[in-house]
Amino acid sequence: MEQIYEILSDDEDMIGLIIIIDHPRILCQFRNRENQFENWSDVEFFQRFRLSKNTVNFVLQTIQYVIASPTEMNHAASAAEMLLVTLRFYATGSFLQVCGEAK
């Protein structure tokens, strides 16, 4: 849908046109992020992140207010998600492997 506006300048001979194209908004669908603490058993969690769930929770409680995003705008990652991605990177040493594991 186009809307056309005329702009008259001081000189009556010059008329400018502005065309504004009104695009419909496309709403994005975001997947819900899985809770990694519930998704893995204690042994699988340790193999994956090289720390126990209790240790990760302790570290998370210690640093979550420092690393947390001030808003949830644009579906920002939570402090727990940021910590777990970092720990997974340290456990594997490969960012490509961490990215490839996203479902």
Image (cartoon, rainbow, N blue to C red):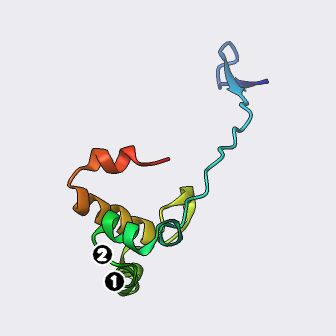
Q: Position of residue 16 (x, y in %)?
A: 66, 19
- Identify the amino acid type marked 1: Thr
Closer to us: 59 or 68: 59
Residue at horizontal 52 percent and vertical 65 percent from the top = 39
Above or below for 69 versus 73: below
Above or below for 96 versus 68: above
Secondary structure of the residue carrying numbered label 2: loop
Secondary structure of the residue carrying numbered label 1: helix
Q: Which residue is mark 1?
A: 55
Q: Position of residue 23 (x, y in %)?
A: 71, 31
Closer to us: 30 or 58: 58
Q: Which residue is mark 2?
A: 51
Above or below for 62 versus 72: below
Q: Position of residue 97 (x, y in %)?
A: 31, 47
Q: Are marks 1 and 2 in contact (CB under 8 Å)?
A: yes
Q: Give the residue furthest to the top.
A: 13
Q: CA distance from mark 1 to mark 2?
A: 6 Å
Q: Residue 56's quadrant in the figure?
A: bottom left
Residue at horizontal 65 percent and vertical 25 percent from the top = 10
Closer to us: 68 or 42: 42
Residue at horizontal 38 percent and vertical 85 percent from the top = 54
Residue at horizontal 65 percent and vertical 44 percent from the top = 28
Quadrant of image for the N terminus: top right
The dot on residue 43 is: none
| Tally of numbered tags | 2
